[in-house]
Image (cartoon, rainbow, N blue to C red):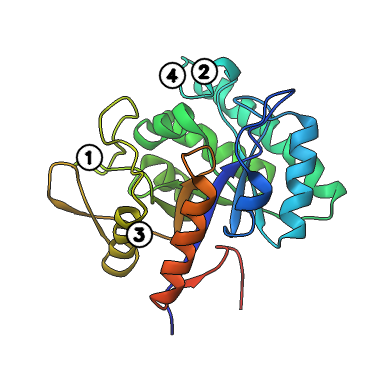
Amino acid sequence: MAKRVDMNCDMGESFGAYIIGSDEELLKHVTSANIACGAHAGDPTVMDTTVRLAKEHGVAVGAHPGFPDISGFGRRMIDFSPDEIYRMVVHQIGGLQAFCRIHDVWMQHVKPHGALYNLAGRNRAAADAIARAVYDVDHGLILFGLAGSELLDAGRGVGLQVASEAFADRSYQADGSLTPREDTGAVIEDVAEAIAQVERMVNDGVVRAVTGELIGLEADTICVHGDGKNAVQFAEQLRKALERKGLEVAAIGDVD
């Protein structure tokens, strides 16, 4: 039986007069969409449009909640209490859930964005707040989190199905964390290098850290960034390469 992996992409991050990413083209190549919920990016019109487009392309929909920080694109750390994090995640999931309902779309998952994602990876109180929020809104949702992170442990702790996420276009530190974006080499722009990294993660369960050593990780779902350089070509080439290697690329929630 072929190994199976999901390809997810952050999208729906345009807002107002600002266009970010090429969502409709990316939806031809990915299997799960993490849709911004109006906090770090996105707005009601974009949320509505992106859910509709995902449905048209047969792509699974997930909420992508982040810190309310449009000017920083949700990538700046903001000091919120666990209770505040809980409420902002509930609020954002609920907003996208409403658009899923009017388009008769099943919401598959939740994946935090940016600084909130990174915080939940290492801070158990923040991770617990997010996991509780997801469970309380809909305990059937799948929680996406960085492989080996506190967020996955928190999700399992409340009884959620979790998906271990790995990154095609980001490099890793020796502790399994992502290289900070401000560091040289944090983003992998060479498609061949990214494909080799994904193949190693999926087939061998390891990734090579920037320091040279191989570290173990699970890869249930692979993230490609929709706002990256040549994002559409990157996603298309990655998917074709994975399928040529005999991997089944399908949404995590698809059941045979």
Residue 58, placed above or below residue 207:
below
Measuring from the top left, give residue 161's x and y in whole percent.
52, 57
Q: Residue furthest right?
A: 102
The front one of 105 and 186 is 186
Residue drawn 40% across and 29% down?
Answer: 119
Q: Residue furthest left?
A: 212
Disc number at residue 77? 4
Asked which secondary structure carries label 4, the reply is loop
Residue drawn 45% across and 46% down?
Answer: 145
Measuring from the top left, give residue 40's x and y in whole percent.
59, 25
Pair 1/3: label in front: 3
Q: Which residue is mark 2?
A: 72
Alpha carbons under labels 2 and 1: distance apart: 24 Å
Residue 254, placed above or below residue 123:
below
Alpha carbons under labels 2 and 4: distance apart: 9 Å
Measuring from the top left, give residue 122's x and y in whole percent.
34, 33
Quadrant of the drawing holding the C terminus: bottom right
> Can the viewer see residue 160 in this picture?
no
Asked which secondary structure carries label 1, the reply is loop
